[in-house]
Amino acid sequence: MKHIKVLLVDDEKEFVQTLSERMEMRDLGSDVALNGEEALKKIDEDVPDVMVLDLKMPGIDGMEVLRKTRNAYPNVQIIMLTGHGSKKDKKEARRLGAFEYLQKPVPIDILVNKIKLAYKKKIETTMMAATFAEAGEFETAKEILDRDKDE
């Protein structure tokens, strides 16, 4: 399997660094951002395959990072990971296109599995859109990517 580019975004520095180390132990490379502003900058510099995103952060919160990322990079799969969420937040995250919404603490193996599933979805969507584009069906390819953006 290709090396999945994962961006971990959480304002709890110790938590996100430990999570990054645990990802590395499972052959998942990850970059870290400690707030929403830093996350958006890193995404613009090197678009990840999957982002694991905290909901509550000072400054630009996770919901706004989710919204901006899905608009600019619809194929990035986003997993919300929060210790402070609600059913309303979960519903809103799904409406904005989050792949998954998980409550902390989550077992590392479950999170890794969700990351792999998110990556698989990204690849399948990209391949399907590319197939239509190669056949000259550019509108259909665009619709596939836009549909993924709106899911």
Image (cartoon, rainbow, N blue to C red):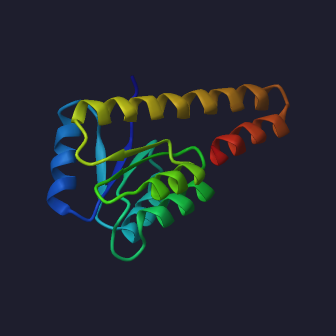
Query: Could you tell me which residue is drawn at 72 percent across and 36 percent down?
Result: 144
Which of the 4 image quadrants contains residue 109?
Answer: top left
Give how far across and how far down residue 30 sits, in percent.
30, 45
Depth order, front residue of 51/98:
98
Depth order, front residue of 109/125:
109
Q: Quadrant of the N terminus?
A: top left
Query: Could you tell me which residue is drawn at 46 percent across and 34 percent down?
Result: 118
84 horizontally vs 62: left or right:
left
Query: Could you tell me which residue is drawn at 34 percent across and 29 percent down?
Result: 113
Give how far across and how far down residue 66 sits, in percent.
50, 58
Count of marks, rendered view? 0
Give how far across and how far down residue 20 sits, in percent.
22, 46
Which of the 4 image quadrants contains residue 21?
Answer: top left
Depth order, front residue of 53/142:
53
Depth order, front residue of 48/104:
104
130 horizontally vs 81: left or right:
right
Outermost residue, top direction?
A: 1
Instruction: In the rendered view, tell whether residue 51 sits above or below residue 133.
Output: below
The answer to whether residue 73 shows anywhere in this view is no
The answer to whether residue 13 shows anywhere in this view is yes
Outermost residue, front direction?
A: 87
Give how far across and how far down residue 111 sits, in percent.
31, 36
Q: Quadrant of the C terminus?
A: top right
Instruction: In the rendered view, tell whether residue 42 sits above or below residue 4.
Output: below
Query: Could you tell me which residue is drawn at 21 percent across and 63 percent down?
Result: 12
Instruction: In the rendered view, tell whether residue 65 sits above or below residue 120.
Output: below
Instruction: In the rendered view, tell whether residue 42 sits above or below residue 103.
Output: below
